[in-house]
Amino acid sequence: MRSSNPVLSRRGAFGAPQAGPQQAPQYGAPYGQQPSGGGNPFGGNTAQYGQQQAPYGQQMTPDQLNQMYRQQSAGPLQTGRMTVDDVVAKTALTLLTVVVFGAGAWALLPAENYAWAFASMLAAFGLGMFITFRRTIHPALVIGYAALEGIFLGAASHAFENAYSGIVVQAVLGTAAIFVAMLWAYKSGRIRVTARYARIGIAIAIAFVLLMIVNLIFVAFAGGDGVRGGAMGIVFGVIGIALGAFFLSLDFHEVEQLVAAGAPEREAWRAAFGLTLSLVWIYLELLRLLAIFRD
């Protein structure tokens, strides 16, 4: 199964080769056989845990039937498969880490000291790239990324709040509203994640990031705001927020696919990392856009 989300799309990210198109597991296939149309990308089979099957072409004895019926049904804790509840719990823990470290940075770091914000931003970026391209996911890395991102967001938010009173609350509420709106649009079918939709969105995102890097270099040497100020800044702010919403739709689609495919429970941490990354993107773009409107 190929993923459309850049955070979750690495070949072999879930510990098994993906040689071709995969389908979600189909229950009811004989024990030890893969469902038609492709194998299970996570290396499991579709028989319930603890069931015994007679050899092919032979009938089960009454003792085998009685033993099978006495077995406890498989549940989420027995199968070790990723569920939506796992993603929700791990995303909540990751966001809580961002908030706690952000509050600490707000309270302890001087608002005018941008060195801490810049250093934590670079560290979070580096760790985020490492997580993205790492074959296996590790919870400590995701929590570490959330802590570094929280320090950066806390320092940056403090500086914005000192300059524009109330802007942080507005940005937080706006981020939550966009998340809820995108979740509703995706679940209701108003947004359909297709291969073409993903390709176009990712191409726009790459172009946007490259332009922002060029703009940052220009601002560093020439001064001013570049394309992030004035009317042009509003346009790019709206594009940035739209791209963050686009990444959320990819995150929702990926979670749905991984749950259907029976991904291992640990992959919920990768989904939590992707959702946190998208929400941080939206929050920062909202801060910049609201600051432009305030000016």
Image: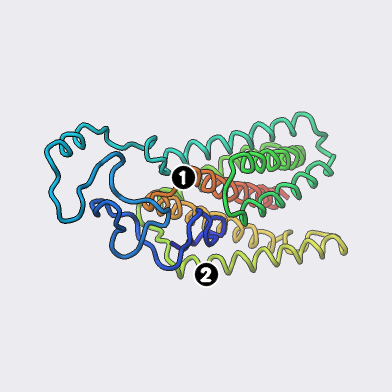
Which numbered disc, 2 or 1, marks the residue that appears first in the sequence? 1
Check the image and name the residue furthest to the right.
221
**Mark 2 and 1 residues: CB-CB less than 8 Å, in contact?**
no
Q: Nearer the viewer, residue 40 or 91?
A: 40
Q: Nearer the viewer, residue 265 or 29?
A: 29
Q: Secondary structure at mark 1?
A: helix
Disc 2: CA contacts within 10 A as few (<14), some (14-19) or many (>=20): few
Q: Secondary structure at mark 2?
A: helix
**Residue receiving disc 2:** 200
Q: Position of residue 195 (x, y in %)?
A: 45, 68
Quadrant in which the N terminus appears:
bottom left
Q: Nearer the viewer, residue 281 or 68?
A: 68
The structure residue drawn at horizontal position 47% and vertical position 39%, both measured from the top left corner, is 88
Residue 124 vs 227, above or below: the answer is above
Q: Nearer the viewer, residue 292 or 185?
A: 185
The structure residue drawn at horizontal position 48% and vertical position 61%, both measured from the top left corner, is 17
**Residue receiving disc 1:** 180
Q: Image quarter for residue 146? A: top right
Q: Position of residue 193 (x, y in %)?
A: 43, 61
The structure residue drawn at horizontal position 80% and vertical position 33%, both measured from the top left corner, is 109
User: Which of the labelled discs sits on residue 207, or is there none?
Assistant: none
Measured Cα–Cα span from mark 2 to mark 1: 23 Å
Q: Is residue 107 left or right of residue 98?
A: right
Q: Position of residue 138 (x, y in %)?
A: 59, 43
Q: Is residue 100 left or right of residue 30?
A: right
Q: Amino acid at mark 2?
A: Ile
Q: Is residue 148 left or right of residue 35?
A: right
Q: How is the image coloured?
A: rainbow
Q: Is residue 22 left or right of residue 225?
A: left
Q: Position of residue 269 (x, y in %)?
A: 53, 43
Q: Amino acid at mark 1?
A: Val
